[in-house]
Structure formats: structure tokens, C-alpha cells
Amino acid sequence: MAAAPIYLDHQASTPCDPAVVAAMAPWWTEGAANPSSRGHRPGLAAAAAVEVARGRLAQALAVPPEGVVFTSGATEADNLAIKGLCEARLERGRHLVTVATEHRAVLEPCRYLERLGFGLTVLPVGPDGLLDPDRLAAALRPDTVLVSVMAANNEIGVLQPLAAIGALCGRHGVAFHCDGAQLVGQAPLRPLELGIDLLSLSGHKFGGPQGIGALVLAPGVTVAPQLHGGGHEGGRRSGTLPLPLIVGLAEALDRALADAPARGARLLRLRERLRLGLEALGGITVNGALDPRLPHNLNVTVQGVDGGRLHRELRRWLAVSGGSACSSGAPSHVLQALGLSREAAAASLRFGLGRGTGEADIDQALAVVSRLLPALR
Amino acid sequence: MGLYLDACAATPPHPQVLAAMAEAQARFWANPSSLHTPGVEAAEALERCRQELAELLGAPGHRVVFTSGGTEADNLALLGLGRRLKPGRLLLSPLEHPAVAQAAAQLQREGWQVVLLPVGPDGRIDPTDFGPLLAPPTRLVSIGWASSEIGTLQPMAELARLCRDAGVPLHSDAVQAVGQVPVDLGAVPVNLLSLSAHKFQGPRGIGALLLAPGLEIEPLQHGGGQEGGLRPGTEAVALAIGLVRALALRLEALPREGPRLGACRDRLLERLLACPGLRGSGAQGQRLPHHLSLLLRSAAGVPLCGRSAVRALARRGVAVSSGSACSSGRSSPSASLLAIGCTAAEARSGLRLSLGPWIDDDALAPLPGLLESLLPTLPAADPS
Ligand SMILES: Cc1ncc(COP(=O)(O)O)c(C=O)c1O
Ligand SMILES: Cc1ncc(COP(=O)(O)O)c(C=O)c1O
């Protein structure tokens, strides 16, 4: 068996932090009752534990706990935010605005609403991947109810100008949804200070378990439920609350934020080492603005190679991706939105560094690319 | 430790399930959609789960869609198929969990006509009454395999054959049945089946919808195209592994454990029915083996408040429920009890005791005396 490839794909998923696994462990058994069973002690204890975790999450994001709706992940949170808000504000208008480089968990619900008759404006980004707030201002209409712009891009890591977007939406009375899946846990994010009305997040992107996420709502913002049933989460999302996963989510977020500045600084140094090393090989260009950008993300196009072969050859040694994991191999719509051709987009690599990444990983990754490159060209 | 008699609300995961999940967290944590080795390994582990689950339910040809639980599976079944069909009549068992009943209410808002099926005093649907209702404009049927509140098992094989012969798709919420009684889709042609892992000692946060070959539904969530486009979102591989391991363990033990719990339950019921005022509800023979449901009455025959009994028992360390967990926040009379002909007061007098592998006769021994002593302290059930 060959050695395991070097894992540099932390934006697809992170391993669940062993400390988080340990924090969840007692709750699988001790908190095994159904938190909706309000008649008995085990049920009440489970419900209390849910509220403690909700409080921790709310505190980390500086929002009131009532605004936290637990979901199965960011995809569900995005769907609930977009469809739920538009459904709740049907009488106010039927137009929404998003950006070409959003994750499919945002783009697809928007397109679904478009099929139902909503107006949809998908804004372009500049070659740096950033949305120009003036373009957004020009796209707002009297019947616009929602603007959805992500915090950090999952492929190119660029950080959108959230405060400017939030202020603009606030002035126009338009709800602002932000897919925060790639930023939450990597840097402090206070949605209310940025004018964000709905924020999506996902545990497995910051050392938490898969299968849990949340939609965070600003006070006064309501969404029509998309899952109907027992009326959990204030009627906003039915289904038995998975207490251990909820505890894991809160624990993971606290842990991720506790060392986020130091981790970010360390990963930025490693990322720059990787970038400079790749650029020194020649014919490799960086996609998206280097600043503002997630410190742990790098996305490059390798000139003069076939994308399919590039990925096939690297795969044995390096776990990186060509784009979002969800697109499973199709050339990235994000890179094409930056103006890259399909071929160039296919010959691109996303590196996502993470907690476990060290200097040796970067140097090995560089060695692999420089060894394979001549034969690929 | 108290006495936990609320297995129908939730069960603690089996230790082997926890061990399997811990191992999976370490081995299969990558994103199954990623094309690199760790991703492919996670994807293969997930596919093995899918296959094994289908086989455990006698449905190797069915599609398995993993969901976040029973509620999502029920919603995906009803809304996913309902939105694909021309609105027509939806036949619904009146004993359904809110996850089905509320999804049906949503379909009603979208133009469907929802008709509740008649049931007998035992909660059973009579196949001879049912057959003629399958005529147009009926386009969809949803019948829970086993009732969460009164434990009644439906004659699923006969009902399913009637639906098949009439060409009407049948959904069954089998959340309370899977792992408690044999569920064999090879013998019972249900088209859509929902289940939830935490009811059979699997993890919370995962369930599944099984779809018969060729059946097309709409997704509820839109996004990255996972689960064949029917349920986008990064798949929780460790939870899927926990679900399948839990069901395999359950089904392995079922031939022994089913009859053992059934016998414990029968002995307990016999002692409880000897207490003046206590009556059983639901079916006698055709019921979940671990499920016991009562109607509480004073010695004078006045229905007593079930929720008060739950709280009084809780103070003495006994966890039971007055209905399904999800509706326990509300004080309305139980829809299931009303459907089997109870008065409003009786429909507030229900008590459900549900057993699990951790229960034996000794654990249950003090219960009848305790309940009998509590009855005189309970308020009458609200008759409105
Ligand atoms: C019959 C039935 N259906 C659906 C559900 C909902 O399942 P979940 O709690 O996994 O969302 C439950 C339990 O709560 C149930 O008993
Ligand atoms: C920006 C972004 N949004 C949404 C998602 C979907 O999250 P989840 O996998 O939790 O559904 C992802 C990751 O897959 C993401 O990177």
C-alpha cells in the first residue's frame, strides 16, 4: 500500500477534532432521551443540554440564542434561509440577488425559486473574485426581498465585503443572507455587526461532526419552515434534535475560534510558502485576490497541462481538489466566473490547509508538483 | 438511575454502534464527494451502508436516500412525490406522527385533498374498507407501519398489495417499526419507507428514505447533488455507519428480543389491568412488542390527565410519555386516540410505556403499585 496522500483539502471537510469526539461521547448515552420529552427528567436534561449548546454557539457569534436554528448542515441552512425567507415575504416581492461564485447550496435554491416565477439576478464578480457593492446597489429593485452573498469563497477563499453589503441591504430593507460555511470557525464573525440577517454554517468545516449545522437569524427575521412536523426549533425546523451533534458543533466552534488568530497566522505563512514555491516552478498563476482571502486557501491554475491528467497524476500523492467537492469533477463555475476558460478551470488546484498541516506537508506537496510537472507538460 | 420506559421517543445507542462511529470518525471523515483517496474511501464506506441497509430491509433493489432523521424522510417522501404528481387525493392514516400529518397539511395547501382513513377501535385499517378508496382521484397513500402512540401494527402486506394492484404509490412511516418487528419490503410492496436510527439504538441525526426502483421524486433541498440529487448536503458517513450497525445488531437479536420484550410487556399489562381504572388502548395482538399504552381513569371511571401522570412518574424516576414526544409540548387531545373513538377527555388520558433491551421483569416490578398509588392524586382530564 502506498502512503496516504498529503491531505490539503480542509475546505471540503476537516477531521472531527478528537476533543470534539470526546466532548460528544457522554451525550450519546447520558443525554439519550428525546429533548422533546418534556414530561420526564432525562428528556428535560437533554433539552437543557441543547439550550446550553445553543447559548455557546450564540455567544460565539454574538447573537441572541433564540436566533439559532439547528439544521443538518449548511446546505439545509442555505435552503431554509433562501426558500424560507422568500416564502415568508411573498407579499413584499419576488426578486432575489446572488453572485455567480456562490456555492451550489445557494445557487440551486435560488434557481429553484426562479423556476417558480421569482426574478433572479446573478451578479458577476471581478477577476479578483470580489463583488463590487456598487453593482449590487444597481441590481436592487423595489421588489427585491433577499440578497445572498457568501462570506468566504470555498474555492478561491476570497472574502466578500460583508459590511458594505450589509449596510446597503439595511438601507433598502432587503434581507441579507450570508453563507458563512467557509468563514465561521476560521475568524471571528459577528453577523449582527455586519448587517447579516441570516447566516449559514456547517460543523464539519471547522473540526465538528458531519450532519450538523445551523441557520442563525437576526432578531425579527422569520423563515417559513421547509421541514414540517413536531414544530421543533420554534416551528422553524421540525425533527428530533441530535443532541450529541449539537454539543459537538458548539464545542468545535469554541475550539476553532480559541486559536483562530494564531492558526490563521501560521497557515498564512505555510500558504505563502506553498504559493511562492509553486510560482517558482513557472507557469502557475494564482486565482482570486490574495487579500482579502482566507489564510489557509490557495487556488492556482497550471498552464499548459490537461486538467484531467493533472488531477489523475497528483491524486496518488496529494489530496487536493479541482473545485468544490460537490461538483465532483466538473470544471469550476467559480473559476469560469473569474474569466478562466473551461480548460484553464479544469487545470486548477485548490489547496485547503488546516489544523493538521505542517511545513513538511507543504514541502512534500511542492516536491510532488515539481516532480510530476515536466511529464505533464 | 431511573427507569427509562420511553424507548419509542429515543433509545441510547448500542455500545458497538458508538465504537463503530468512533472508528468511522477517524477513518472516513473526508468528504465523500471528494475525488481523492480519503474522499473515495468515505464514499465507498457510504455505498456499503446504503447496500447493507437495503438488504437488511429485504429491498436490495430499492434506492436508499440518507436524511437527517425520520421527519426529513417523511417530508421528502410526501412532498417529494406529491410535488411530482398532479394534485389529487391523499389517503392518510389518522394515527400518523406530526412529521407525516404536517407534511400532508403542506400538500393540502398546495392543492391536494387529504382524506383520513377510517380505523377500528384497535386503530387498524380494514383492507376491505380501504380497497374501494383507492379509486381516482386517489394518487398517493401514506400509512404508518406502527403507531407511535398506541402501538398498533397495520396489515401492511394486504394494504400494500391493494395499493400495488390499484397502481397507487404507498408511503409508510416505519420509524416505530424498523428494528422492532420484521420489515421485509420483499414481501410487502411499499414504495416509499421512512426510518430513523435513534429509535433502534442508532445515532440521532440520521434516518433514511427507501424508494422502490423506478420511483421518481423531487428533492426538498437543492445544492451539490449528493444522494443522486435527491438530498444534497455533505453526507454524514459516521452516522450512516452507526445507523446500519445499529439495525444489523437489532435484527440479529430480534428473534429473541422481540418475544422476550413482548412477554415482559404482556406480564406488565396484565398486572396493570388488574388496577381499577386502567385500560389498554390500541390493538392487542397486532401491536409493537415493546409498546404498552393505557387510558387512565379514576375508580369512578373519570378520565385522568395523562400528562400529569407523566410528570408524577418522572418525580419518582420513571420516564414514560403521554403521546408522541413531539407533541408533548402541546396540550391538545391526542389525534390518534380521537381517531379510535375516544372522547376528548379520554384522548387526554393516554399513557405510553415503551421498553428496550435494558428492561426486564425485575425493573418493571414496582411499576403497577406505583401507578396505582398515583392515580388518586391525578386531576381529571380536561373534557374539551
Ligand atoms: C412514527 C414517527 N415518525 C416520525 C418520527 C420523527 O423522526 P425523527 O425524530 O427522527 O425526526 C417519529 C419520532 O419522533 C415517529 O415516532
Ligand atoms: C460555502 C459552502 N456552502 C455550503 C456548503 C455545504 O455545506 P454542507 O456540506 O454542510 O451541507 C459548503 C460545503 O460543502 C460550502 O463550502
Image (spheres, rainbow, N blue to C red):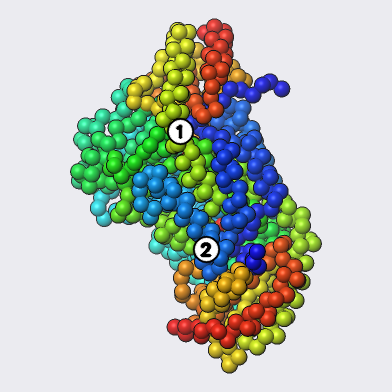
Left or right: where does residue A5 sit relative to residue A274? right
Structural distance between the alpha carbons of marks 2 and 1: 33 Å
Q: Please give the name of the residue rendered at 47% of the width and 12% of the height, measured from the top-left corner.
A: A278
- The residue pinned by badge 1 equals A259
Q: Give the position of the N terminus of chain B as an image quadrant.
A: bottom right
Q: Amino acid at mark 2?
A: Leu
- Above or below residue B38? Residue A147 is below
| Residue depth check, mark 2 versus mark 1: number of the one nearer the observer | 1
Left or right: where does residue A120 sit relative to residue A302? left
Left or right: where does residue A311 sit relative to residue B4? left
The quarter of the displayed image where residue A319 is located: top right
- Above or below residue B362? Residue A10 is above
Q: Residue B20: horizontal and vertical position, in percent?
A: 68, 44
Q: Residue A90: horizontal and vertical position, in percent?
A: 29, 54
- The residue pinned by badge 2 equals A44
Q: Residue B13: horizontal and vertical position, in percent?
A: 65, 53
Q: Please give the name of the residue rendered at 66% of the width and 73% of the height, measured from the top-left corner.
A: B292
Q: Which element carries disc 2, helix, strand or loop?
A: helix
Chain holding disc 2: A
Q: Cβ–Cβ below 8 Å for labels 2 and 1? A: no
Going from N to C along the chain, the mark reached first, 2 or 1, is 2
Task: Tell me if mark 1 has few (under 14), some (14-19) or many (20+) residues whose alpha carbon lies within 10 angstroms of its own.
Answer: some
